[in-house]
Amino acid sequence: MNGVDYSINWLELFHFRYHPDKNANDPKAADMFKEVTFSYNILSDPDKRHQFDTAGFEAVESDNQELELDLSSLGAVNTMFAALFSKLGVPIKTTVSATVLEEALNGVVIIRPLPLGQFVSRRVEKQCAHFYSVTITEEEARAGFVCRVQSSDKSKFKLLYFDQEENGGLSLALQEDSAKTGKVTSAGMFFLGFPVYRLDQTNSISATKDPDTSFFRKLEGFQPCELTELKAGTHVFAVYGDNFFKSANYTIEALCAAPFSEEKENLRNIEAQILSKRAEISKFETEYREVLAQFTEMTSRYANEMQEIDELLKQRNEIHASYTVAPLKRSSSKSRSKSSSNEAKEEGQTKEKRNTRERPKKKRWYNIHLRVDKRKAC
């Protein structure tokens, strides 16, 4: 894949060749890290590695081009560099720790009750999860149910929903990554009886390289949630700490949507407008690309026409100048500068002589007339 030696540890390759301290003025360093991380993601996944070995890089890239890392398996040094490039805008998507999923599937996690209509504030360690159970009635299920989590510290976290298996274990069914909304980070799941959409804000690698592509693909991640409603009974949610190094502070609450009928209709209307806008943007992109291509073509033609006009006028002036039989005297820049310096010198000498003539004569002490009395002896 792009000539990268995969026998070398991917972070050693980054550290020695693409470290930002050594490539402060090289904008390609971040792009190279994306490719190295993407390659690592393939090599660490047996299925993706098999796809690459059998069908090549394009097969893996078309299947999924997003970077997904399990931070719990990276180690401290690798996590540090992943956090660094996340700050630089590299789209690194994290996954829930395999340890957390395995413990949930085996039914060995601690589940705390979360009363409906109340909130709980806690701190969860990085790459760990707090599990909560919420019980709703038939009436509450018909009215709609909402589970929201927010962090005033702008911590990164994931809101998870689990299906309950027959053996008592839990399997991950839904996942919402936190996103910045104003002064907080938040995530929510809305089961309101109609399709509620979620927006995946993780841009692909190609989109981050092109601002136009990033804009036109912005609403592509606006997709309906898999579940639109919950049945009466007990449901399990979890808050997963997704910070790179520190724990995450959060507040979780479970609400019945019955008191929020106005908000429910507003959400339905605004999402319908977003869907309409997405269709408009798709058509607008075609028009924009056509006009942009014409503009680029016209700009290039403008530069070429200007260059040709200047060249033609230059040739015309040379032809005009060729109509002569008189010898052309050309003075070098040195002679011109020398003559100008001589003129300045002569002018200075003339001023000095003039000032000398106009200056009044002063008596000197040796010109003073001394009277000596010859009658007296010295």
Image (spheres, rainbow, N blue to C red):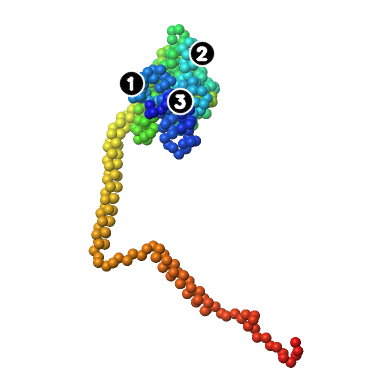
Query: In this orientation, does residue 316 appear?
Result: yes
Q: Nearer the viewer, residue 164 or 333?
A: 333
Q: Position of residue 327 (x, y in %)?
A: 28, 67
Nearest to the eye among marks 3 and 2: give it.
Answer: 3
The disc labelled 2 sits on which kind of residue? Answer: Val
Where disc 2 sits, the SS reads loop
The disc labelled 3 sits on which kind of residue? Answer: Ile
State the residue at coordinates (50%, 19%): 129
- Quick one: which residue is furthest to the right in this view? 377
Nearest to the eye among marks 3 and 1: give it.
Answer: 3
Q: Position of residue 195 (x, y in %)?
A: 36, 21
State the residue at coordinates (27%, 53%): 311
Mark-to-mark CA distance, 3 and 1? 23 Å
Mark-to-mark CA distance, 2 and 1? 40 Å
Q: Position of residue 191 (x, y in %)?
A: 40, 19
Which residue lies under the disc numbered 3?
A: 8
Q: Which quarter of the rendered picture does the C terminus lie within?
A: bottom right
Q: Position of residue 375 (x, y in %)?
A: 74, 92
Q: Is residue 158 above or below residue 163?
A: below
How packed is label 1: few (under 14 Cα within 10 Å), some, or many (20 or more)? few
Which residue lies under the disc numbered 1?
A: 55
Query: In this orientation, does residue 117 appear?
Result: no
The disc labelled 1 sits on which kind of residue? Answer: Ala
Which residue lies under the disc numbered 2?
A: 109
Query: Reading the chain from its start, which is encountered first: label 3 or label 2?
Result: 3
- Asked if the residue under mark 2 is in contact with the one under mark 3, i.e. CB atoms within 8 Å, the reply is no
